Amino acid sequence: MPPLLPRPALLPRGGGAASAYISHARAALFSSSAHLSSNPPRIPPESPQFINVPNPPQDQSIEALRELKPIRGHLPVPRQVFSHRDSYLKPRDEWLAKSAPAPSSERSQQPPRSEVQAWKRRMAASRRENMRVGVRALYARKQLTDKRRLETQRANLAAHHAAATAPEREDERLTRVSINEGTLRTFVEPDPRRFERALESKARTEGLMARRSEARRDAIQELYMKARTFIVDEADLEAEVNRIFAPEYWRNMGLSASGFEVHNIWDLEGKPKTVADMLNDVVRNSSTVLKNTESERTRTLKRQKVVAEELTGGKLDDI
């Protein structure tokens, strides 16, 4: 019994090698020469057809799609005959009479003069009749389609509503986990003290706005007090630069608190205050002799300045 030919679906992808192998096998079956013992055409290892991967009966690969013959032509897109709002008027006689009117000339009212003219009149009447029948049939089909679509939508809506409002099944009730009733109650009860809390919040907000307004007025007043030393033109800038960068600027400051000559700002005002220094000033527990010997008059003047600023509602010059 001769060997069976391999099916095309079980051959490697690609038409060239498969057709060559089939032709070689057919020639070998009906030949008595030395071609019977010859080997099939060799496929190099770098070829993608080196490994025999059989194609399934319904192959959707790119290679299978390339082997299909291209389909010539295409189907036209159906027109929406009844897409306008006044489409319901098309099946009526008035619209059909305007779309395909009957001949109204005097010549058309006379009997036909020949068989060709009679045939043309019959064809025109047939076209008008076909248009009437076609438009009415399409409108009837549209009504039927809309009716079926509406029935399907209503049925789906009723099924969804029934499924949403259906009671819980017994098997689900018996197999669900136990949940506390308080957890399932998600309703948020109104606060009984909500009006009192609103009044308290209103009072806090008014106080905050009053403090902000007072701080804003103090800032404006302080800005007004310091505006006398602002540099507003080039002459003032030049005078201030000459005064600060003069060679004898620090020498004119006199002596420092420790009795030495002043050479920089550190010698004049000392190092910046720390938190511990501020606390020592309050409790009068400073380790420096100058702070301990500070007169009560200076402290009283500072306190009086703060009190005067609170009473007058403005800022005063530094002491």
Image: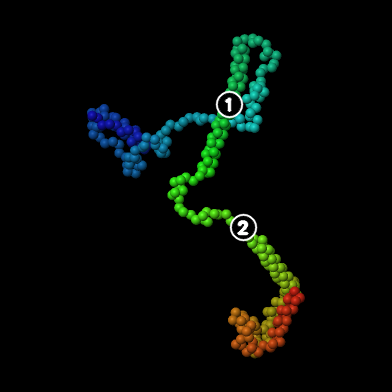
Label 2: how many residues lie within 10 Å, few (<14), some (14-19) or many (20+)? few
Residue 303 position by quadrant = bottom right
Q: Is residue 227 visible?
A: no
* Residue type at the position of mark 1: Ala
C-alpha separation, residue under disc 1 versus residue under disc 2:
59 Å
Judging depth in this view, the residue of 134 and 63 nearest the camera is 134
Q: Residue at x 69, y 79 (%)?
A: 244
Q: Quadrant of the N terminus?
A: top left
Determine whether label 1 and label 2 are within 8 Å by CB. Answer: no
Q: Which tag is nearer the camera, tag 1 or tag 2?
A: 2
Q: Residue 67: percent from the left, percent from the top? A: 40, 34
Label 1: how many residues lie within 10 Å, few (<14), some (14-19) or many (20+)? few
Q: Label 2: which residue?
A: 190
Tell me: residue 136, above or below residue 287: above
Q: Residue at x 73, y 79 (%)?
A: 307
Tell me: residue 30, above or below residue 293: above
Residue 117 position by quadrant = top right
* Residue type at the position of mark 2: Pro
Disc 2 secondary structure class: loop
Q: Is residue 237 visible?
A: yes
Q: Quadrant of the C terminus?
A: bottom right
Q: Residue 9: percent from the left, percent from the top? A: 35, 34
Q: Label 1: which residue?
A: 140
Q: Residue 155: percent from the left, percent from the top? A: 53, 36
Disc 1 secondary structure class: helix
Q: Residue at x 65, y 27 (%)?
A: 89
Judging depth in this view, the residue of 247 and 85 nearest the camera is 85
Q: Does 71 sit left or right of 233 as displayed?
A: left
Q: Residue 228: percent from the left, percent from the top? A: 75, 75
- First in sequence: mark 1 or mark 2? 1
